[in-house]
Amino acid sequence: MRVAHIESGRHLYGGGAEVRYLVGGLAAARVDNVLLCAAGGELAERCPEAQVVALPMAGDLDLSLIARARRALRAVKPDIVHVHSRRGADLYGGVAAALEGIPAIVTRRVDSPEPALWARLKYRLYARVVALSRTIEAQLVGCGLARDKVVRIPSAVDTGRFRPEPSARARLLEAFALPADALVVGVVAQLIARKRHEWLLEELPELVRRDPRIRVLCFGRGPLEARLRAAVAARGLERHVVLAGFRDDLAELLPGLDLLAHPAEREGLGVALLEAASCGVAVVAAAAGGVLDVIEHGRTGVLVAHDDALAFAGVLARLLANPLERAALGTAARADMRRRFSIQAMVSAHLDLYSAVLCEPAAAEAARRATAREPRETSR
């Protein structure tokens, strides 16, 4: 089986990281993978398990992506196309696959309802739509998609890489010049509005007044960086908040945290939650979207009403003062990640989905037409 993956994201967090997990797992299962991704992006350089085809991808208005994707698909001749992202790919990738007569599926990652008519038209291009969480699944069905067209397959986490590591604490303190007695809270998220960093910053002055040992490390990058730096300065939090940017060594730093805070108002599933939980770090999160699929309140983390910033701050303060409770939550979360969010489970679910789609009459007809074309050369 040859699968052509289309991913327009340029970075290796969130969806990009999940594509790497999937491609690597599929390759181990002897699936031939081709990755159509953004030229100049990190993914193009760091996915050795796939034949990489780097294309210009300029976002939602890049109509010319259809022609480029068609040419690429015609050259590599996949059995099925899997579109992984938005930024134009979820529409133009589907159109390109349809015009080439190749069955396609798309993964919907974001917790954000679409206009019903638009969703029904767009997803007609696809044999199946993969939803990462129950929230996304319900949104798609609410738009009018047939329930049997929507398949829920959650993201995965590499529990071998993201794992508890006692030496991570010293590494984290040294990397950010933190005092030995610091209580370190991590926020791992793009610096965009829906992740609500400012919502957390509003409550932070009172927290650090009560316990000056608190330090907050914000991992990630995005368009709000300058605004967040200004917000930190305006609240006099320069000693307590670090905008740490994107880190390739996040897996070596996360286990050193005391807590992960996730105040996002919308979330498809939350890869950062999976990674922190896999490291045995206790998580406090706003109860929104796919977060409800990841955290079992009171056992593997603590959920707070999505609109209650004061309660969120109160839970942070309580857990920072209770290391035994943090440890119990982290231990349970680690076990849960290994059981429910393994890469093997995600890969197996996708293999079953690809096989089901390829056995359907429409895919069989596409395969019949493909046999009339010139023989396909394998890339391996």
Image (cartoon, rainbow, N blue to C red):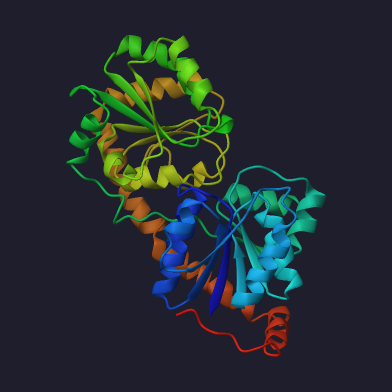
| Left or right of residue 57, residue 285 in this image | left
Q: Is residue 144 visible?
A: no
Give the image quarter of residue 73: bottom right
Task: Name above or below for residue 251 compared with residue 70.
Answer: above
Q: Nearer the viewer, residue 243 or 70?
A: 70
Q: Nearer the viewer, residue 340 or 41?
A: 41
Quadrant where the C terminus is found in the figure: bottom left
Provide residue 90's location: percent of width, then percent of height. Answer: 67, 56
Task: Name above or below for residue 169 compared with residue 280.
Answer: above
Q: Residue at x 34, y 56 (%)?
A: 338
| Left or right of residue 332, residue 71 in this image | right
Task: Name above or below for residue 92 compared with residue 358.
Answer: above
Q: Is residue 285 visible?
A: yes
Provide residue 370's location: percent of width, then percent of height. Answer: 68, 85
Provide residue 22's location: percent of width, then percent of height. Answer: 46, 63
Q: Residue at x 47, y 22 (%)?
A: 200
Provide residue 316's location: percent of width, then percent of height. Answer: 37, 24
